[in-house]
Image (spheres, rainbow, N blue to C red):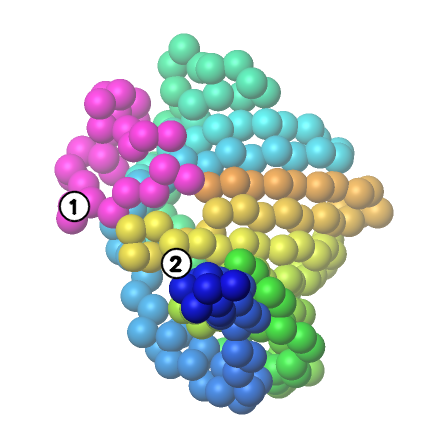
């Protein structure tokens, strides 16, 4: 076997070698640094689809225009049927799926390393999490998988509780134009003893510098040309 072939085989072996696993505390340090640099986009446009099964079955597709708390929600289709006239709602509400809002932090959660997960050429890191304050109710993160390249949450597992319902789910994140955004969620809940499931998928993200004032003052559907590619 020639020296060139041996060198080629050695290079191939290096490329296929398992990535080096970091110490869990080093991962958490990088995670906290990455989270401290997260900037929640103020202005964004995206599409989302929701499927609900249980006491009420529903499938719908929407376009969202957001500027801070101001939200324009246009329903494009219901149960697979495109609406001839899109339904428009203009409201004010927080982005409950924003990374900075849902991701656990060391100041409010404990982290327990579970395992490293091979994902292509990188390792992701799984941690069990628990609120530091045992009295915390409502939304609570139970597990997080940290991306081994950017050290941001790639998947968040959570539970929810209210006087009328309890549930659990998982929330997936990915990169879009430099922002770490939700791309999928699966939730299973018990509503007054009845099982309900919901799946949400997000896509078509855009982050324009501004939106026209009429976006939040008109109940008419916006021109098709202003919608993001889906």
Which mark's residue is nearer the viewer, 2 or 1?
2
Counting labels gives 2
Residue identified by numbered label 1: 210
At x 38% / y 75%, what residue is drawn?
34
For the magenta stretch, what is the residue range? 203-230
Earlier in the chain: of badge 2 and badge 1, it is 2
Determine if the magenta segment contains residue 225.
yes
Q: Is residue 228 above or below residue 163?
A: above
Please give left or right for residue 130 compared with residue 71 in the image: right
**Prevailing SS of the magenta stretch:** loop
Please give left or right for residue 12 compared with residue 125 in the image: left
Q: Residue 230, how many percent across, how many down?
A: 38, 30
Q: Is residue 108 above or below residue 178?
A: below
Residue identified by numbered label 2: 180
Q: Is residue 145 above or below residue 229?
A: below
Q: Nearer the viewer, residue 163 or 227?
A: 227
Q: Residue 28, how many percent across, how many down?
A: 50, 83
Q: Residue 147, how many percent across, how many down?
A: 49, 67
At x 61% / y 33%, what residue is drawn?
51
Question: Which disc number belongs to residue 34?
Answer: none
Which type of secondary structure does the marked residue at label 2 adopt? strand
How crowded is the residue under tag 1: few (<14 C-alpha within 10 Å), some, or many (20+)? Answer: few
**Image quadrant of residue 75?**
top left
Separation (CA) of disc 2 from disc 1: 20 Å
**Image quadrant of residue 37?**
bottom left
């Amino acid at each position: 076997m020639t020296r060139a072939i041996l060198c080629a085989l050695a290079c191939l072996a290096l490329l296929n070698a398992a990535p080096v696993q970091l110490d869990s505390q080093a991962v958490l340090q990088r995670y906290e640094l990455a989270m401290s640099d997260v900037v929640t986009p103020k202005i964004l446009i995206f599409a989302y689809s929701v499927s609900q099964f249980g006491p009420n079955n529903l499938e719908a597709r929407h376009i969202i225009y957001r500027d801070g708390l101001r939200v324009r929600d246009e329903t494009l289709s219901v149960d697979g049927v495109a609406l001839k006239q899109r339904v428009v709602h203009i409201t004010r509400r927080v982005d409950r799926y924003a990374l900075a809002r849902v991701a656990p932090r060391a100041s409010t959660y404990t982290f327990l390393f579970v395992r490293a997960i091979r994902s292509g050429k990188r390792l992701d890191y799984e941690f069990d999490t628990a609120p530091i304050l045992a009295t915390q109710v409502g939304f609570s993160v139970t597990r997080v998988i940290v991306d081994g390249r950017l050290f941001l949450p790639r998947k968040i597992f959570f539970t929810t509780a209210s006087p009328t319902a309890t549930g659990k789910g998982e929330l997936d994140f990915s990169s879009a134009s430099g922002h770490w955004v939700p791309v999928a969620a699966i939730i299973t809940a018990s509503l007054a003893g009845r099982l309900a499931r919901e799946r949400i998928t997000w896509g078509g993200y855009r982050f324009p510098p501004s939106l026209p004032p009429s976006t939040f003052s008109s109940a008419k559907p916006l021109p098709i040309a202003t919608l993001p590619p889906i």
